[in-house]
Amino acid sequence: MLNVLLIGMPIVWGNLLLQTHINVWSIRYYLRKSGQSTRDAQGAWPLFGVITILMFGTMLQIALWGALFWWLDEFPTLETAIYHSGVNFSTLGYGDLVMSAKWRLLGPLEAINGALMISLSGATILALLQQQLRDKFRGTAN
């Protein structure tokens, strides 16, 4: 079990670092692209950009886990490893592909990592939507 943690935790920490930077980049992108305007759809494109950035970041994290699984020789192809990783990261858990007993604890570790990272992306989107609403109501109050 210690081996699993020694192998898996650097990926978790790497994903935490990656997600932190992706969230910050997303917020900076949004702030740069969304000026004050009276048009109702004014914030749609910056928000779309943020969602795209966050989605790309999630896919990158899935690929990182998949690369680890492939490197550990758990799956015959990188594509299969990334598929398995996507099922784990999203907490879907089909169970159609199973890891060996030696590394199977990496699955729940990735699922916990994925749940946290996807939640953080959702929180970022929600915070930006709330900011849009605050800006809109502030603009109409004047």
Image (cartoon, rainbow, N blue to C red):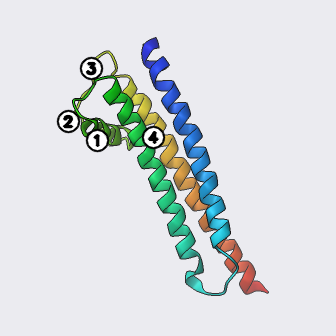
Q: Nearer the viewer, mark 2 or mark 1?
A: 1
Q: Is residue 76 left or right of residue 126?
A: left
Q: Amino acid at mark 4?
A: Gly
- Residue at 73% from the left image edge and 83% from the top image edge: 139
Q: Amino acid at mark 2?
A: Asp
At mark 3, the secondary structure is: loop
At mark 4, the secondary structure is: helix
Q: Which mark is first along the chain, 1 or 2?
A: 1
Q: Amino acid at mark 1?
A: Tyr
Disc 1 designates what residue?
A: 83
Query: Pointer 2 and pointer 1: residues touching (CB < 8 Å)?
Result: no
Q: Is residue 98 left or right of residue 25?
A: left
Q: Determine which of the numbered discs, if any, sits on residue 29 in the image.
A: none
Quarter holding the N terminus is: top left
Query: Pointer 4 and pointer 2: residues touching (CB < 8 Å)?
Result: no
Disc 3 designates what residue?
A: 100
Disc 4 designates what residue?
A: 114
Q: Is residue 139 above or below residue 27?
A: below
Assess disc 2: are there few (<14), some (14-19) or many (≥20) residues with their C-alpha within 10 Å of its C-alpha.
Answer: few
At mark 2, the secondary structure is: loop
